[in-house]
Amino acid sequence: MNRIYNFSAGPATLPTEVLEEAQAELLDYQGSGMSIMEMSHRGKYYDAVHKEALANFRELLNVPEEYAILFLQGGATTQFSQIAMNLLGEGQVADYINAGAWSKKAIKEASIIGKVNIAADCGSEIPTRQARQEELKLSPNAAYLHCCSNETISGAQIKEFPKSDAPLVCDMSSDILSRRLNVSDFGLIYAGAQKNLGPAGVAMVIIRKDLAERVPDSVPEMLRYTTHIANDSMFNTPPTFSIYLLCLVSRWLKKKGGLEAMEAQNDRKAAELYEAIDATDFYSGTAVKEFRSTMNVTFRLATEELEKKFIAEASAKGLDGLKGHRSVGGIRASIYNAMPEAGVDALIAFMKEFEQANA
Amino acid sequence: MNRIYNFSAGPATLPTEVLEEAQAELLDYQGSGMSIMEMSHRGKYYDAVHKEALANFRELLNVPEEYAILFLQGGATTQFSQIAMNLLGEGQVADYINAGAWSKKAIKEASIIGKVNIAADCGSEIPTRQARQEELKLSPNAAYLHCCSNETISGAQIKEFPKSDAPLVCDMSSDILSRRLNVSDFGLIYAGAQKNLGPAGVAMVIIRKDLAERVPDSVPEMLRYTTHIANDSMFNTPPTFSIYLLCLVSRWLKKKGGLEAMEAQNDRKAAELYEAIDATDFYSGTAVKEFRSTMNVTFRLATEELEKKFIAEASAKGLDGLKGHRSVGGIRASIYNAMPEAGVDALIAFMKEFEQANA
């Protein structure tokens, strides 16, 4: 077996230990004679996994009692409309910060459901960035304020979360569990799993339970947060194998020292990589420095031809998934929790070599 | 490794060969140095899997060109409302047949969206059954007629699909791919994967493309069938690992001889099991004979105490998951495609032993 360094933005690299454990028990989970994915979600084996995953994430993120943690399907993309269906009542307005491609998608879906006010718009600026508090034009009595904590495509990350009288709703798909977090500052946090949590096919939602009560009667049962809160995310058959992998990742995070240790490691990895980018004019970062993401490190070379060569040669050396998003081009190194420091070191070494050969 | 016979209703047993293949390549897919679940859904490896799965199911089910096959998230339960959101316009009525617990859930969700007419109601009858054509009270100009082809809990299966001038919409979660099917008879077919298709976390939808065009402007993009048709189920990140397993199951089905061979095997397994039930008065089937399911074989013993003993002793002999649904009790043996004939033989042998010891 020859594992490479996978810098893909998502679905993304997972801890090798997690995959090894899943592999070992794939056909016979704990001597049951069945795979965990073949078992009833109402049975004792899966029930223990489900509860452990919930408990571990509650502990890791220090989630207060008045918040529920939900495992839902449909990714963050389903949340874009589900949030508005549940929280944006008739005659109300929701504030949205547009900081890039993912903000825009959330805005587009919410606008089909209700009234949206763009509180700030830096979504098309280059260098890329997040909005600053002083530029926010907030609505009086907004239903909520929505932001995207880390724009995966542009590589711009919120360092200080916006403040508003309205509940803060945040898409944390690409940086949840990468740093410490004060959950009490938020009304709702959501994240597709396929970056920092596990495989694609499950989304985590953390919601202040009283907010969920806002849901209008016109919303189908399956799309109400109240339904999933009342049923502990077992209203319908959950994506059991995906949640099992989330559980293994949560154990791995606890073993690694939790979010404090993760944050320190992520800061270190990102700092080293940005240092390599800033060392010469050969590479140039694409995000405003104060908003540089610790998860998705985006940069450019002088020409698209050179970028193509960089990506191809890196791939040949076992550094894969470095191509920037098709909408913006350039290079993107996604260095989520599961990317080891050795992977970042290998990338930096390659960058130096490549520069020497091509400068 | 000691695999047992798993009669669970879903998530359910999967072909051992499929799990072995998934296990072998879990950390290194085709020499890529990555798991298939760690790869970008836009990359060449996953793209080939996605396309092969679609092509295999199109071939297996003989799906005509004017129909799209979609892989969606949220299970059949999300479809309950999504169907009504997309196909049931304002001022229209949809006909629903109530034949049991799953029909009822579909009706409940659709009723939140629009007007529902109960075309027939045999959902609470015991012995359990499906509706007959002559008892259907169809609405003139109905948006569609909805039925559930196999009520997983009651063990009652449609043998001849209902006829209506309206498009037929069918929940086939627990019997899709178990028998030959004329897709042209339907407007929309849907199925959660966790019985006959693969792991929980993905639903298959087969929809006549022109029907999808009915969708009102008020439906969010993510919940429109048109969105997923236009994007080949890649509008957002699909549940890649689940679809990879579906692809492996589709290959296994083709190798086994396709739906003709599956139907013959399923008929044989069910006939043998029902023969054992009917052989004496010790066991009694719970569904009307003409509607007996080939997938979920439901029966009772004289007392609940005896049923409890049956389930416990069977489990001790490696025959697991035989407990009936908590809402109805009794015994339920789910014998989906992946349950080998040897598993059914073992169950029948145990039934005879148990009867001799307890009659």
Image: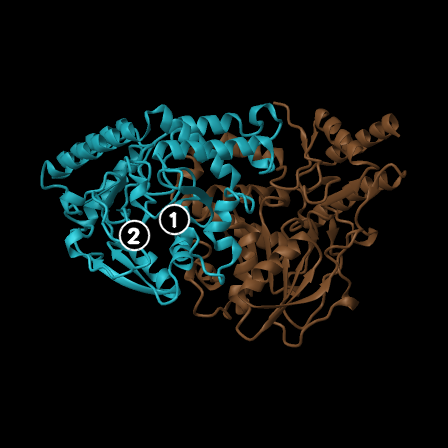
Chain colours: A brown, B cyan
- The answer to whether A208 appears left or right of A176 in the picture is left
**Callouts 1 and 2 in the same chain:** no
- The answer to whether B252 appears left or right of B295 in the picture is right
Q: Name the residue under label 2.
A: B326
Quarter of the rendering containing residue A328 = top right
Quadrant where the C terminus of chain B sits is top left
Secondary-structure class at tag 1: loop
Label 1 amino acid?
Arg
Residue displayed at 46% across by 46% down: B72
Marked residue chain, label 2 = B
In this orientation, does residue A68 appear? no
Quadrant where the N terminus of chain B sits is top left
Judge by depth and name the residue closer to the eye, B306 or A200: A200
Whether the residues at callouts 1 and 2 have beta carbons within 8 Å, the answer is yes
- The answer to whether B242 appears left or right of A188 in the picture is left
- The Cα–Cα distance between marks 1 and 2, rounded to whole angstroms, is 10 Å
Residue B181: % across, % down: 29, 38
> Is residue A5 depicted above or below B123 in this figure?
above
Residue displayed at 24% across by 29% down: B264
Residue B333: % across, % down: 26, 40
Judge by depth and name the residue closer to the eye, A58 or A137: A137
Q: Name the residue under label 1.
A: A42
* Residue at the left extreme of this rendering: B280
Quarter of the rendering containing residue B259 = top left
> Is residue B139 depicted above or below B253 in this figure?
below
Label 2 amino acid?
Arg
Residue displayed at 39% across by 62% down: B89
On residue A207, which mark appears? none
